[in-house]
């Protein structure tokens, strides 16, 4: 990476207020994305990956979510301290996000064309543009996400489109005005596997063509392997391991990563591993020390008492674990 | 199985009283988040306690029965008579307190009959959607709902002899269809839920499905509506007694007091204003309580379970 | 053993959608499906949305009435709706649904949920109900402390385990599992699948396991059938299916699944990449329903619907290109 990374999350903590006290979901995560880099954020349900990305765009539920500490630096400016105008600038020119359920992200009473042109109209680059130019840009965006017959689709309503097409329209909406970073929150999960494959390929090609950075949130290691240059593995509000994609799959270190990889059913057969004992911790009363220790097959006394350090294994590969592993 | 050398798991079965207490604590938290609901609860409790302990709380308990005192008639509010006296010299505070009894009794009896009947019919109609029984129930319900409620109550009460019992019968008859419609919508959508289908596939009887699977899931809107309805029944009851079709004199009734006093407006304003205010406050109290009940029973909030 | 426990013959389940020009238009969710399932095997049924795999499951359970065809279970034709089926049939044929959130009644606690099948089929006398519920919980590796929890208070994986315990409570012979782990994380999935396999072996059950995840199928099923738009495309023993996939749709599906190791990459067919959309099940194109997306399509594919043929023993495929025109 040349200079500063595009997005840098430093020691971010996020708590949710509940009836029984604070639910301490994120325990201080560190993450960065360089320009043009594709990151995978892998974790299972409830690990906090969606929470962390929503914190980036500051769309956490107000009144319930509380950020006791942490910085989110976009172009070295802290998003958490921005005023409304600066934040608006980030949301319209810097970062865009696509979500898991395309039907929920699209307004059913407007045509998809209207929804795309609205984005252009209210962006800075769209001010003063003629209507026809805006429409041209929108149709171009629809073409870029590999939807055939773009002019006809422009006038369609979301309910006339299939799930895969809706998700592609969401991608189009996210890239129609120039952006630097796209955050994709499990975009293929609600889709069939063949369609998911196509959407992922489209996303990857588009992001590479435009030189955008990508953060891909997913629970599937396979998807991360296909799309990402570097992968962060998250568990219970902590980043437990980060490495370049190839390195992670050839030399996984963290016991959670190992357990996760073992649980994935293999196309080569051979039966399934036993899975990972236990379940994700209760964030109201999280375990002391390492949050994974109650489930860890290699846990020692130290793990229960202290937070694990971040060990640097070189080449961008880091593990949050005590150095007592046999591998 | 991967074994963890560090944790020991203990099995604790929670006792019934613990579960109840936890449940109550959580419900109170949800209810009391909105201060207005607590005010509503306060008003309702005050109304209920006043009604129950009316003879003890009223300054002149005898004024609620056959009583005249023309010397003290038409007196404005004073230290002796906080809300003044009516044309017969009866203390208005006392009469309001005692009128609450009839109002609450009416609400309780009307709801305890109309709610079970309405809910049962709604469950059956919703679950057997498409069947002729659904058509029959819902069309009858529609007929009842098509008539303006107050008109229906008036018509029935006018046909029967005017007294509290017949007023209650009239209101009960016009009240059940609202619950049928409410439950019908819910039952017909729950019918397609997987847990209901699952119970059918296991072989559960229709009774089990209606009352043990579907009904528990309908209770929140039913209870919310009941809380609000107490106020509305009281209002309809007051409307009936306003035209003389409820409690007969000398037993006090709020609507009757409003009607009687209206002839003397605006000079003896206290004879109408205070009973009207009483009605307003009661309805307000139950409405706020109903909001609180809805918040308490509402599901699906983040951070609650 | 090669006893056929469930035989599906020419099953058709159509749903009326609307009338067009005086003719009723149907969604042909299941269109002439033939499948024989043997006692003691785990039959895998793979397909994407619109394939009809869930519809078959629900038709077998009697939730939908088929328009044509027969379902023969343990020698008897059970082609009636669920509410007309005898209790003994309901006891022997059970299903586990996909969504752990909605398949359990949120107002009941686990004990009530598990007691229901025990009470309905009178499995044990009243005094022993509580003990039997404990046993069921331990069978799915949950502690008896779960008895008084409500579904909302436990995680998705545990809810699914309760659903499985409920399905097995009345000792059925045949269990349909409709994507039981699709809504769950991979680590929980592994636990549940292993438990399902153990239970199947111990109780000699027969499973119909439905999923869209071919990698999972590879590790659990004994035989696999793949469906597309209401018709079966290919049936084979698991080993043959994955070593030698014949149907182009099978190959397309295999090439789309994300894998996590290079050796698995090698196993994926390279030549066929997914393309096109799944057509709407109302407007199924004439001829072979897959021909619009098929890279191997020939002239005949848009005209005549292919029939199922046995290419090698136990390996059936329905495709003109595979059958040599």
Image (tube, rainbow, N blue to C red):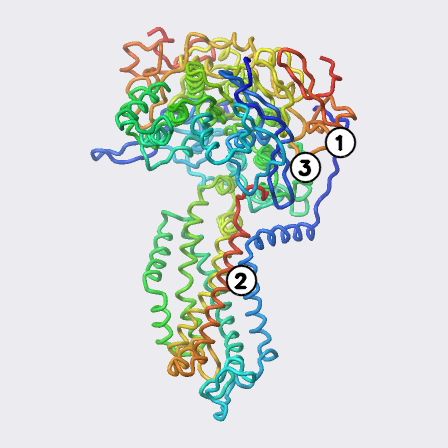
Whether residues under marks 2 and 1 lie with C-beta atoms below 8 angstroms apart, the answer is no
Marks 2 and 3 share the same chain: no
Residue B65 in view, yes or no: yes
**What residue is disc 3 on?**
C135
- Residue B178 screen position, x and y as percent: 41, 59
| Badge number at residue C78 | none
Tell me where residue A145 appears, x and y as whole percent: 37, 20
Residue picked out by circle 1: B7
Question: Is disc 1 placed on a helix, strand or loop?
Answer: loop
Q: Identify the image quadrant of the C terminus of chain B.
A: top right
* Callout 3: SS: helix
Please name whichever residue, C262 or B201, is drawn nearer the observer in this view of the structure.
Answer: C262
Who's the residue at 65% across and 36% down the image?
A: A282
Task: Using the image, tell me which numbered label, if any, was put on residue B40.
Answer: 2
- The chain under label 3 reads C
Residue A271: x and y, percent?
Answer: 60, 17
Q: Image height check: is A220 above or below B136?
A: above
Task: Tell me if residue A58 comes above or below residue B96 in the rendering.
Answer: above
Chain of the residue where label 2 is placed in the rendered structure: B
Tell which of B277 and B100 is nearer to you: B277
Q: What chain is tagged by disc 1? A: B
Q: Nearer the viewer, mark 2 or mark 3?
A: 2
Mark-to-mark CA distance, 2 and 1: 48 Å
**Which is more N-terminal, label 1 or label 2?**
1
Which x, y percent locates residue B283? 47, 66
In the displayed structure, does residue B14 sit left or right of residue B87?
Answer: right
The residue located at (52%, 45%) in the rendering is B204
Is label 2 or label 1 in front?
2
Q: Are marks 1 and 3 on the same chain?
A: no
Question: Relative to residue A11, is residue C110 depicted above or below?
Answer: below
């Amino acid at each position: 990476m040349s200079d500063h990374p595009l997005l840098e999350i430093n020691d971010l903590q996020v708590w949710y207020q509940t009836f029984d006290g604070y639910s301490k979901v994120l325990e201080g995560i560190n993450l960065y994305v360089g320009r043009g880099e594709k990151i995978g954020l892998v974790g299972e349900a409830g690990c906090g990956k969606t929470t962390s990305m929503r914190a980036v765009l500051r769309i956490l539920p107000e009144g319930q979510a509380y950020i006791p500490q942490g910085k989110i630096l976009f172009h070295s400016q802290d998003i958490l301290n921005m005023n409304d105008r600066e934040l608006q600038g980030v949301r319209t020119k810097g970062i865009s996000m696509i979500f898991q359920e395309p039907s929920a992200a699209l307004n059913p009473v407007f045509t998809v064309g209207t929804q795309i042109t609205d984005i252009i109209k209210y962006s800075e680059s769209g001010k003063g543009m003629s209507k026809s130019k805006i429409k041209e840009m929108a149709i171009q965006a629809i073409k870029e996400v590999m939807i055939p017959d773009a002019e006809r689709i422009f006038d369609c309503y979301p309910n006339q489109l299939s799930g895969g097409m809706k998700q592609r329209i969401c991608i189009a909406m996210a890239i129609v005005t120039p952006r630097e970073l796209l955050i994709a929150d499990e975009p293929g999960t609600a889709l069939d596997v063949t369609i998911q494959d196509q959407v992922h390929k489209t996303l990857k090609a588009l992001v590479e063509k435009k030189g955008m950075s990508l953060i891909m949130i997913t629970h599937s290691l396979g998807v991360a392997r296909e799309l990402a240059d570097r992968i962060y593995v998250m568990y219970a509000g902590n980043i437990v391991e980060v490495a370049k994609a190839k390195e992670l799959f050839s030399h996984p270190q963290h016991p959670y990563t190992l357990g996760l990889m073992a649980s994935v059913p293999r196309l080569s057969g051979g039966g399934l591993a036993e899975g990972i004992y236990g379940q994700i911790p209760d964030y109201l009363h999280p375990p002391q020390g390492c949050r994974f220790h109650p489930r860890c097959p290699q846990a020692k006394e130290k793990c229960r008492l202290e937070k694990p350090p971040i060990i640097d294994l070189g080449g961008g590969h880091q593990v949050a674990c005590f150095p007592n592993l046999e591998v | 199985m991967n074994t963890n050398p560090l944790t020991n798991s203990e099995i604790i079965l929670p006792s019934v009283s613990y579960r109840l207490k936890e449940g109550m604590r959580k419900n109170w938290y949800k209810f009391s988040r909105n201060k207005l609901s607590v005010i509503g609860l306060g008003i309702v409790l005050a109304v209920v306690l006043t009604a129950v302990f009316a003879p003890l709380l009223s300054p002149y308990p005898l004024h609620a029965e056959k009583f005249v005192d023309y010397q003290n008639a038409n007196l404005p509010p004073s230290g002796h008579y906080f809300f003044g006296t009516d044309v017969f010299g009866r203390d208005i505070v006392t009469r309001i307190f005692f009128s609450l009894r009839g109002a609450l009794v009416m609400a309780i009896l009307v709801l305890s009959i109309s709610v079970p009947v309405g809910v049962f019919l709604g469950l059956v109609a919703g679950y057997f959607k498409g069947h002729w029984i659904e058509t029959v129930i819902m069309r009858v319900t529609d007929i009842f709902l098509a008539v303006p409620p107050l008109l229906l109550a008036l018509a029935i009460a006018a046909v029967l002899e005017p007294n509290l019992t017949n007023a209650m019968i009239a209101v009960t008859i016009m009240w059940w269809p609202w619950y049928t419609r409410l439950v019908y919508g819910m039952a017909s959508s729950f019918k397609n839920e997987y847990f209901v289908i699952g119970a059918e596939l296991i072989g559960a009887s229709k009774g089990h499905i209606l009352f043990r699977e579907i009904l528990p899931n309908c209770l929140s809107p039913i209870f919310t509506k009941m809380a609000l309805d107490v106020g509305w029944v009281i209002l309809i009851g007051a409307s009936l007694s306003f035209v003389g079709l409820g409690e007969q004199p000398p037993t006090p009734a709020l609507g009757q007091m409003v009607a009687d006093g209206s002839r003397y407006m605006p000079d003896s304003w206290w004879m109408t204003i205070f009973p009207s205010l009483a009605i307003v406050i009661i309805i307000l109290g139950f409405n706020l309580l109903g909001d609180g009940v809805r918040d308490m029973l509402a599901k699906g909030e983040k951070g609650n379970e | 053993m090669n006893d056929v426990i469930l035989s599906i013959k020419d099953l058709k389940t159509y749903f009326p959608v609307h009338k067009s020009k005086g003719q009723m238009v149907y969604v042909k969710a299941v269109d002439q499906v033939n499948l024989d399932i043997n006692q003691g095997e785990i039959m895998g049924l793979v397909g994407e949305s619109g394939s009809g795999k869930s519809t078959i499951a629900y038709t077998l359970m009697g939730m939908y009435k088929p328009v044509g065809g027969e379902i023969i279970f343990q020698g008897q034709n059970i082609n009636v709706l669920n509410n007309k089926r005898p209790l003994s049939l309901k006891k022997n044929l059970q299903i586990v649904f996909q969504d752990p959130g909605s398949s359990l009644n949120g107002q009941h606690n686990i004990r009530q949920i598990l007691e229901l099948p025990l009470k309905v089929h009178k499995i044990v006398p009243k005094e022993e109900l509580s003990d039997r519920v404990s046993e069921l919980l331990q069978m799915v590796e949950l502690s008896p402390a779960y008895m008084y929890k409500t579904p909302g208070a436990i995680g998705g994986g545990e809810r699914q385990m309760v659903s499985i315990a409920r399905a097995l409570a009345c000792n059925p012979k045949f269990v349909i599992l409709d994507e039981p782990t699709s809504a769950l994380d991979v680590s929980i999935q592994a636990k549940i699948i292993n438990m399902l396999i153990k239970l199947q072996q111990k109780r000699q059950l027969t499973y119909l396991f439905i999923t869209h995840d071919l990698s999972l199928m590879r590790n659990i099923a004994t035989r696999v059938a793949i469906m597309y738009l209401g018709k079966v495309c290919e049936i084979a023993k698991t080993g043959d299916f994955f070593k030698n996939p014949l149907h182009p749709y099978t190959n397309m599906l295999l090439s789309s699944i994300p894998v996590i190791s290079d050796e698995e990459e090698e196993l994926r067919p390279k030549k066929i990449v997914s393309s096109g959309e799944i057509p709407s099940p109302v407007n199924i194109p004439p001829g072979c329903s897959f021909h619009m997306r098929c890279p191997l399509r020939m002239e005949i594919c848009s005209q005549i619907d292919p029939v199922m043929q046995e290419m090698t023993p136990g390996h059936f495929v329905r495709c003109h290109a595979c059958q040599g025109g």
